Amino acid sequence: MGVHAQRQSVIRCPQCGFQKAETMSSDSCQVRYECRKCATILKPKAGDCCVFCSYGTVPCPPQQTQHLDM
């Protein structure tokens, strides 16, 4: 019985509020993201592995999988 991680997340820029749906990599964490509206470079907050964990509606697949294994 395999549970698949969600790969879609809406990332929100903390600078301008712009939101965009993005597809996340299934096996790596994205540590840099450029806002399509204001060009702010987003980096993970302290303690988060990637920008999706910090600014997305869904955490990255590696984190989703880690929580399922607990």
Image (tube, helix red, strand yellow):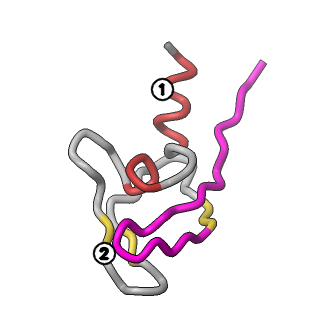
Which of the two marks, 1 or 2, is nearer to us in this view?
Answer: 2
Quickly name the residue at label 1. 66
Q: Is residue 43 left or right of residue 30?
A: left
Residue at (53% x, 17% y) in the render:
69
Q: In the image, which disc is placed on residue 41?
A: 2
- Within 10 Å of disc 2 (Cα), the crowding (few <14, some 14-19, many 20+) is few
- Within 10 Å of disc 1 (Cα), the crowding (few <14, some 14-19, many 20+) is few
Q: CA distance from mark 1 to mark 2?
A: 27 Å
Report helix, strand or loop for mark 1.
helix
Say which of 51 and 29 sits in front: 51
The span shown in magenta is: 1-20
Residue at (51% x, 75% y) in the render:
18
Q: In the image, which disc is placed on residue 10?
A: none
Residue at (70% x, 35% y) in the render:
4
Residue 34 placed where, x, y %? 39, 77
Asked which quadrant contains residue 13, the reply is bottom left
* Amino acid found under the numbered disc labelled 2: Ile
Residue 1 placed where, x, y %? 78, 18
Say which of 16 and 1 sits in front: 16
Residue lying furthest top in this view?
Answer: 70
